[in-house]
Image: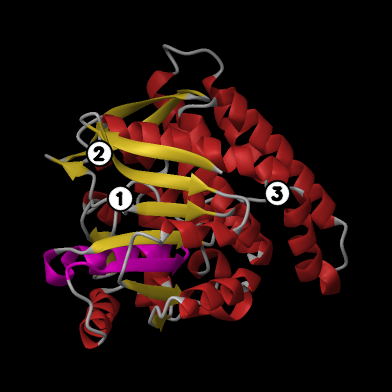
Amino acid sequence: MDQINICSEGRTISRVIVAEDIAGLDGCLQKYSRVYAVMDSNVAMQCPAAAELAQMLNGRGVPGMLVSASEDRKTMDTVMEICSWLLDNGADRNALVLAIGGGITTDMTGFAASIYKRGVRFAYVPTTLLSQVDAAVGGKTGVNFDNYKNMLGVIRQPEFVYVCPRVLESLPHRDFVSGIAEMLKAFMIDGAEDYSRAVEVFFEMMKEYSIVPEEDASEYWADCVNAHVSELTPLIASAIRVKAGVVSRDQFEGGERRKLNLGHTFAHAIETLARREAMTGDERPEKTDITHGEAVAMGMVLAARLSDRIFKGDMNDVTALEEKVRADLNACGLLPDCPFGVEEMAEAMHKDKKADGGKVHFVLLKDIGDVTVYDLTVEEVIRLLR
């Protein structure tokens, strides 16, 4: 078991536990007398660990609520449903709300716990690679508003995050690949050696998976993840350390924490446009069916291209860097070609949370493991990338 602390002013404010099995969660709950569990309904139906979790929680008399975790349901309406359920079940100020699921579940549940009775304690059991390395770590909570990504929310740290990489064996291939983008993002920020190792591991996994007949793909993917879990676990822990270190130094995104948004200004614009296309009835999957991790991959390629335009007089091989990012993402099973033009993204980027005084804090790559925050207007970005 590995514990990674998030600190502020010399004290631990949250902890991330990376464990080999789910059973260790029981010990983490010992100190809490009133626990309320909110679980993604997909996890309840599909994840083998859910049965073990349910047995553990039932033995403690923990009431449970199932939520539908999708971008369409990531709204204040769902947050209010969670708050109503807590109230109906007698949750008081001493409650601990335990979220079990991916990033949508942890975002919504953490936000609900943060506003219920002016804030009660909460903790997470992330069940996707994306949530284990990113969404569940760092204290950001929130929901979508008016089709814009995560526009409502607060920064408030969970009591703990319990990460068990073995639960990933039931994660569908596409959802797993979506999480790869966030892990590689962490290593692009700080961890060139881990970045290279991660690309090696994921490339090997994708190569093994590619030769399996389609009818056996789902079953084989679970075996593939299980076979590589000993390699995945230290990489997951390393990615968490990158984020925990940044958050410890800048909890409320006053400076360094902005680096964690590498690729995300573009990604959030892509997701906004994809939702709009879906609402208007566009049936082209390349424009409507885009996961968060896929959007982040597209965003990181655009960030690398923007870095080329900005730094080409000051850097060596920046074009090769963009090509490397694209090639590595492809090798890891991601297709980072954006279906939208930069002009189409303009409105969403203007309304991005990171917009400040007419400029947006873009995160640019100088090299793998070396990024910088660069303020640009959306119009400047359009001109540079057109």
Name the residue that disc number 1 marks. Answer: 139
User: Dividing the picture into quarters, in which one does residue 271 lie?
Assistant: bottom left
Name the residue that disc number 3 marks. Answer: 229
Q: Who's the residue at 56% across and 24% down the image?
A: 192
Quadrant of the frame with the N terminus = top right
Q: Which mark is residue 200?
A: none
* Vertical order, 158 against 69 (above or below): above
Q: How far is the residue under mark 3 from the one under mark 1?
A: 26 Å
Q: Who's the residue at 38% across and 31% down the image?
A: 245
Query: SS of the residue at dot 3?
Result: helix
User: Mark 3: which amino acid?
Assistant: Val
Q: Who's the residue at 28% across and 56% down the image?
A: 348
Name the residue that disc number 2 marks. Answer: 251
User: Mark 2: which amino acid?
Assistant: Gln
Please tell me whether the stretch drawn in magenta is mainly helix, strand or loop: helix
Q: Using residue 141 as the reference point, say whether residue 18 is left or right of it.
A: right
How many neighbours does mark 2 have within 10 angstroms: few (below 14), some (14-19), or many (20 or more)? many
* Vertical order, 277 against 187 (above or below): below
